[in-house]
Amino acid sequence: MRIKVWGARGSVPSPGPEMNRYGGNTSCVELTLDSGEHVILDAGTGIRTLGLDLTGSIKVNILLTHLHLDHIQGLMFFPPCFRADADIMIWGPASPEASLEDRVARYISAPLSPVEVRELPCSVSFQDTPPSEWQLGSATIRCEAVNHRGPTLGFRVTEGDTTLCYIPDHEPALGTALAETEPEWISGYELARDADLLIHDCQYADDEYPLHVGWGHSGMSDALTFGSRVGARSMLLFHHDPLHADGFLDELHATARRRWSELGGDPAMIAMGMESEELEIGATAAPAGFATTA
Amino acid sequence: MAAQKPLELILARNLLTSISTPAFLVDQHADLVFYNEAAGALLGRSFEDVGRMSPEEWTSTYGPFDANGKPVELDELPTTRAVRDGRPAHAVFTIRSANGSNRAIESSAFPIVASDEGSSGAMIFFWPRDDESGEDS
């Protein structure tokens, strides 16, 4: 399978010349399966440019980890939403309070939006994610609730013998010492176990995290410890804080590689989420593209 | 490796780890899957020493007993009622610690419900009644 990062930023879009290399768009990853289907992970502002790139007959599945604005803001600007020939299925976490469509419609409705969901010319449907795994094209999808603020999912996508795990908003170390905690008690453990590529929250540098405990995001060392505990073969650190400019993220990357090496891993297997980057994920080699992000 | 716990139990355990009120955590079968250090001090043994226990195992180890010294029926325990009925439950009874001494305690059990599928387990908090040793109860 192949992925393309369309937005790796967390919290809020953060454009600006100092953000050019890593990008300022919020969470959105395009997954192209070997069978050709497109699966889109989250609909942050990065999905707008992704939509501009789609041509021909459009049939896409969008998997939403949760409904915080930085994961759905791009939906209203996703060009296929305004094409009558587009078929869009949106999957997201269930809630006892309201349907997924009604919760998304709180954003795509007045006064926040000039259009309503029912006015979109595309064919759009909403589906609560099932509690068990399901098939999308040639991929098997599984989701689990993970530790973040509000109902939030992580996704595990398996195609053939290749597995991608996507947990962009996650604080597994909240209230526990990850290095010592038994696996059964670690949020997201089974979801991420032995993933070929783990895309994971790394919003904060270690010295920033103490001021943000309980906000639902990870410091760098916690993210790497989680990756090490689950046996991830490679990691893409993701959901960059909007204050982190390119130079800061370069330094964070270098520190993360040293830390991963201290945990017994190959430092070349740690990369930073970077807008427009494409990676080929296979079960037998490092994701193509990792070497260029050093 | 044991099966992954549901997130709500993971978060409950993290909470219990962080507080000084003695507390148990049970799963949807009422199996004891964790108790905190404060509960360990009350019972005389840490959870790491005893590990996971079925309701039959932990009641035979720690009680509880009613005011007449008889074991409280499993069905009547706040824990069982919370898991079975999805309702909070409260009781006063006596427990026996690892060194054989008895303690009178109050216990409140709160069901943990995260989905329409019912209870994932319960948190049970204990408050020792320092005015009663429990020796005679």
Image (cartoon, coloured by chain):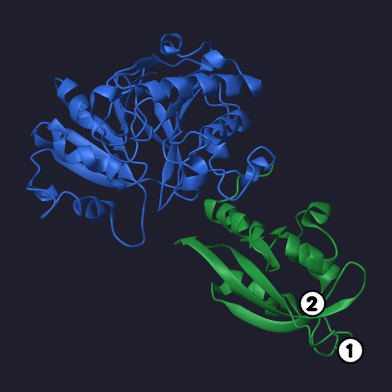
Chain colours: A blue, B green
Question: In which quarter of the view is residue A17 placed?
Answer: top left
Question: In which quarter of the view is residue B3 placed?
Answer: top right
Q: Chain of mark 2?
A: B
Residue A56 in percent (x, y) is at 14, 20
Who's the residue at 42% across and 13% down the image? A293
Q: Is residue A109 above or below residue A260?
A: below
Say which residue label 1 marks. Answer: B136
State left or right for residue A9 relative to residue A223: left
State left or right for residue B132 relative to residue A75: right
Front-most of residues A16 and A180: A16
Residue A234 in percent (x, y) is at 52, 21
The amino acid type found where label 1 is placed reads Asp
The crowd level at tag 1 (other Cα within 10 Å; few <14, some 14-19, many 20+) is: few
The amino acid type found where label 2 is placed reads Pro
Say which residue label 2 marks. Answer: B64
Q: Is residue B2 above or below residue B67?
A: above
Location of the C terminus of chain B (image quadrant) = bottom right
Q: Is residue A13 above or below residue B22?
A: above
Residue A119 in percent (x, y) is at 7, 47
- Which sits earlier in the primary sequence, circle 1 or circle 2? 2
